Image (spheres, grey):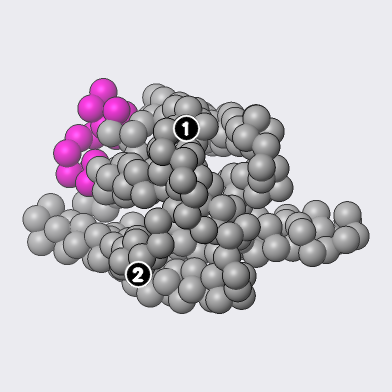
Amino acid sequence: MTETKTKGLSADVLKMIAIIAMTLDHAAPVLASAESPLGIAIHFFGRFTAPIMCYFIAEGYHYTHDVKKYALRLFIFAAISQVPYQLLFGLGNLLAFPPQISMIFTLFCGLIALIAWDRIENTALRLLAVIALCAVTWWSDWQIFGVLFILAFGVFYGDKKKQMTAFALFAAAKIIYNVSSDLITGHNPIVELSKLGLFCVIPLLLLYNGTRKKSAWRKWFFYIYYPAHLLLFAVINLLVIGYKGQ
């Protein structure tokens, strides 16, 4: 559906912001150390991507005419993206364990969680389904929290105040989790400053005006760009910097 609103940000603009942020985030290891001010700044901007992607999964769930095809499309592109993602984040080892699983798989699990939330009437079974889907993403990018972000945007669809409040709570929980993990494992928690970028996405999402332009290339661009840019960075890592990894 295309709406006539013009003020604010369209879906195309927000998705382009997400793509640029993601590309810079994945290029960051070549540009700067993760603990350097530049590295933190790049990753700060990179944190815009996941919430925007999750937001539009929730939007897509409510707009799509066929949620089964939507879920199947996500699953297929998660599978397509897995090899380049594992090459990039698994240090070139396709059989590395634990496996590195792409964000699209997390988005797929989040969509299934949203479907389960809407269609399972029994509260205990509904929560069990969500917990199980969160657990499945344990080795995925944005493990657990990607699913929770999608639920925040999907369950409270139509009420931006509740959407952003729920998202902010989950974002805060993500930061606390990461900082605690760093302290326990002896890593420098300074890198978690970049995750404050999660909160800067909120004003952008509040500016979303509901404008959605229909065209084949807009529909498929991200699905094609995602594995393509992962493969490109994997090749750069391998040939230029000797597989430094992300």
* Occupied quadrant, residue 84: bottom left
**Magenta stretch contains residue 134:** no
> Could you say which is closer to the camera, residue 204 or residue 120?
204
Q: Give, as a single range, the part of the protein colored magenta.
A: 27-41
Up-down relation of residue 78 to residue 25 (above or below): below
* Left-right relation of 93 to 158: left
Q: Which residue is mark 1?
A: 207
What's the residue at 76%, 57% (across, down)?
117
* Left-right relation of 240 to 83: left
Q: Residue placed farthest to the front in the image? A: 4
Up-down relation of residue 160 to residue 101 (above or below): above
Q: Which residue is mark 2?
A: 216
Q: Is any part of residue 76 visible from this angle?
A: yes
* Occupied quadrant, residue 14: top left
Residues tagged 1 and 2 counted as in contact (Cβ below 8 A):
no
> Residue 61's spot in the image, x, y percent?
60, 60
Mark 1 or mark 2: whose residue is earlier in sequence: 1
Q: What is the C-alpha distance between the residues marked 1 and 2? A: 25 Å
